């Protein structure tokens, strides 16, 4: 990565501060909505700051996914669809800028107005907005989409519907959505809902869509060919309605995008080395340094690019299903965390190059601070004192090993905690008072080699505690099905978090859906403290209170010991064909689903 790029990104990250320092004041604007203050871009902006408005159009690229798919409808709970589709083929009334913590600009809507207290939002459709079949987008389509996604769609879309008091047409191209609770983020969430074509689903059950029922969207790409489980081919719609609006200028530049499906990551990487794929994202720093010296890279046909960012670490690791004993006991979870020899495992897998995640929002201003809770954070936590995990008020940090393979000190601590929880060694096996042995099953996807290696090392430590470990390797469809039904004990976990956490936190950790099949609350958190602190975040009227509420939530989640954290992805790593180019200016969120390939282009 060049020093110039790093300097630019540092300048952008520093620039976050004045954006965050604004209060949650009235933030409506005809061309955009910001969560904090006003949108950074003026009404006459030409393009997003990290897009090249003069980028050439053209080129064909091939990307790889692991596993397979049995659906091309990413908006329903049923089935598994290619994750990219909802970013490339469909659009909302507004689109998000990834260079601001949370700001939306007009997409299908030409304007958005809100009440001073954000109790309602009104969108006005662009007259030129069209579906990919050329038909106009109507207010009827908009209202139907909100109701259908809210009642029959994927769980990620259902939460908003229960907070809508009314949705009504207010003009030939305008719609007003009123909310039934005070939550300033709802206006922004509403702007991001995908809009589908109502007429397509007349006489059909949306939630039971078959593979061939490909939802018609308004996005730049349409599916023009596919073979179930093997590939999906998308082409850029030459008649795309929004090619010249500011939000889209310089984006979606590639003519053809093909997604090939592979059985596992190893096969996918070999396909990339052989020139069958145009780009891969690499999440292992050691592999990035040691396994990208193949001939195409040596010739310069493959380029390694690093994309820094300023977002929170999020949480990556091994999640424990607290719906099942003994994982419902925090002492057992803490013991399992003590036995996880991170320092040794990290050195083995990444060469020690990737730092450990220390909390859900680590690496950002929203992260819990070390030591006892103080000030406003403590005030927010104290009403829940009887419900808080140990360490939330007193202070907590993750267990640290000595770097050796044996990790003896932490193993001793783990044994003591397990004994306190009623688990003792009997004939070399850890058993409870009924004589039942403690055995643990870890659910992994086939081909997940890094996590398989981590579990192999971890299992040896657990065996020294008298715990038997079984690794279950399943294909992607089985993995999705079993995690959806909470049919696991421990499995891999990844939850990316933003600089503007909000209503999605209820989906991730809220009690309401903790036991609902398909919930994103994979660990099964049911905590009055978590629920109350999320409410505090959403009700905050200034940045100081918002940060305090988020730091308090971070404390409760981290001390809940639901996930054994592993390494952070502190920089995005993309290896790609030399013909793929990207703008010099990078967004503060760095790489992500709406960065590559959305603002990249192909240049011979």
Image: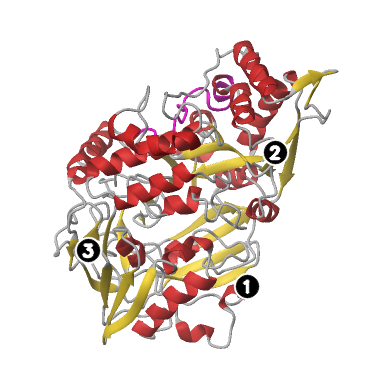
Residue 297 visible somewhere in the drawing = no
In this rendering, position of residue 176 left or right of residue 552? left
- Where's the C terminus, which quadrant? bottom left
Q: Nearer the viewer, mark 2 or mark 3?
A: 2
At which x and y percent is residue 99? Answer: 27, 49
* Quarter-of-image position of residue 411: top right
Depth-wise, is mark 3 or mark 1 nearer the camera? 3
User: What residue is shown at x 23% (from left), y 34% (from top)?
Assistant: 7
Question: The N terminus appears in which quarter of the rendering?
Answer: top left
How far, Cα to Cα, is label 2 from label 3?
48 Å
- The answer to whether residue 435 is seen in the rendering is yes
What kind of secondary structure does the magenta stretch mostly adopt?
Answer: loop
Question: Left or right: 530 with respect to 563?
Answer: left
Q: Residues within 10 Å of mark 1 (few under 14, many from 20)?
A: some
Q: Which residue is mark 2?
A: 325
Residue 362 among those drawn in magenta: yes
| Badge 3 vs badge 1, beta-carbon distance below 8 Å | no
How far is disc 1 from disc 2 in space, using C-alphas?
Answer: 38 Å
Circle 1: element type = loop
| Residue of label 1 | 211
Q: Position of residue 317 (x, y in %)?
A: 55, 36
> Is the Cβ of the residue at disc 1 closer than 8 Å to that at disc 2?
no
Q: Is residue 84 above or below residue 164?
A: above
Q: Nearer the viewer, residue 179 or 122?
A: 179
The disc at residue 80 is none
Count residues near mark 2 (Cα–Cα under 10 Å), then give few for <14, some for 14-19, many for 20+.
Answer: few
Measured from the top left, where is residue 258 in percent x and y?
A: 52, 61
Q: Residue at x 24, y 35 (%)?
A: 10
């Amino acid at each position: 990565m060049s020093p110039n790029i790093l300097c630019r990104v540092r300048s952008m990250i520093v620039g976050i501060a004045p954006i965050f320092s604004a209060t949650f004041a009235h933030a409506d604007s005809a061309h955009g909505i910001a969560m904090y203050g006003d949108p950074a871009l003026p009404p006459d902006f030409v393009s997003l700051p990290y897009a090249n408005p003069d980028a050439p159009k053209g080129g064909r690229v091939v990307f790889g996914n692991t596993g397979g798919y049995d659906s091309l409808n990413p908006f329903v709970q049923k089935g598994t669809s290619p994750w990219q589709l909802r970013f490339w083929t469909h659009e909302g009334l507004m689109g998000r800028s990834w260079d601001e913590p949370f700001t939306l600009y007009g997409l299908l809507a030409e304007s958005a107005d809100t009440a001073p207290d954000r109790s309602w939002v009104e969108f006005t459709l662009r007259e030129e907005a069209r579906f990919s079949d050329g038909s106009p987008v109507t207010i009827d389509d908009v209202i139907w989409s909100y109701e259908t996604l809210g009642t029959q769609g994927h769980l990620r879309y259902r939460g908003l519907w229960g907070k809508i008091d009314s949705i009504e047409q207010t003009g030939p191209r305008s719609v007003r959505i009123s909310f039934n609770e005070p939550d300033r983020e709802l206006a922004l969430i509403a702007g991001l809902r995908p809009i589908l074509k109502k007429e397509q689903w007349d006489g059909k059950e949306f939630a039971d869509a078959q593979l061939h029922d490909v939802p018609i969207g308004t996005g730049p790409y349409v599916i023009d060919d596919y073979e179930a489980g093997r590939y999906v081919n998308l082409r850029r719609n030459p008649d795309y309605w929004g090619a010249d609006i500011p939000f889209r200028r310089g984006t979606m530049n590639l003519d053809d995008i093909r997604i090939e499906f592979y059985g596992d990551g190893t096969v996918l990487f070999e396909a990339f080395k052989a020139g069958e794929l145009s780009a891969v994202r690499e999440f292992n720093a050691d592999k990035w340094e040691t396994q990208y010296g193949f001939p195409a890279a040596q010739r310069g046909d493959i380029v390694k690019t690093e994309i820094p960012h300023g977002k929170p670490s999020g949480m990556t690791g091994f999640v424990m299903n607290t719906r099942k004993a003994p994982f419902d006991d925090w002492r057992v979870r803490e013991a399992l965390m003590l036995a996880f020899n991170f320092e040794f495992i990290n050195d083995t897998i990444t060469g020690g190059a990737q730092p450990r995640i220390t909390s859900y929002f680590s690496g950002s201003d929203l992260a819990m601070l070390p030591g006892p809770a103080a000030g406003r954070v403590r005030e927010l936590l104290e009403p829940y004192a009887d419900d808080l995990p140990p360490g939330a008020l007193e202070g907590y940090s993750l267990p640290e090993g000595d770097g050796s393979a044996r990790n003896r000190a932490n193993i001793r601590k783990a044994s003591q905690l397990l004994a306190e929880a009623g688990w003792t060694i009997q004939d070399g096996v850890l058993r409870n008072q009924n004589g039942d042995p403690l055995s643990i099953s870890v659910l992994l996807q086939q081909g997940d080699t890094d996590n398989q290696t981590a579990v192999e090392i971890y299992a040896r430590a657990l065996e020294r505690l008298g715990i038997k470990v079984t690794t279950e390797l399943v294909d992607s469809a089985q993995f999705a099905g079993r995690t959806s039904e909470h049919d696991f004990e421990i499995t891999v976990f990844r939850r990316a978090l933003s600089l503007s956490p909000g209503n999605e936190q209820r989906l991730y950790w809220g009690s309401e859906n903790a036991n609902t099949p398909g919930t994103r609350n994979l660990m099964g958190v049911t905590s009055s403290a978590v629920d109350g602190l999320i409410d505090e975040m959403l009700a905050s009227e200034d940045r100081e209170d918002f940060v305090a509420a988020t730091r308090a939530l971070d404390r409760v989640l981290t001390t809940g010991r639901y996930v054994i954290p592993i390494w952070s992805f502190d920089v995005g790593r993309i290896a790609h064909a030399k013909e793929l180019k990207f703008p010099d200016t990078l967004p503060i969120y760095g790489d992500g689903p709406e960065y590559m390939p959305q603002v990249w282009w192909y240049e011979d």
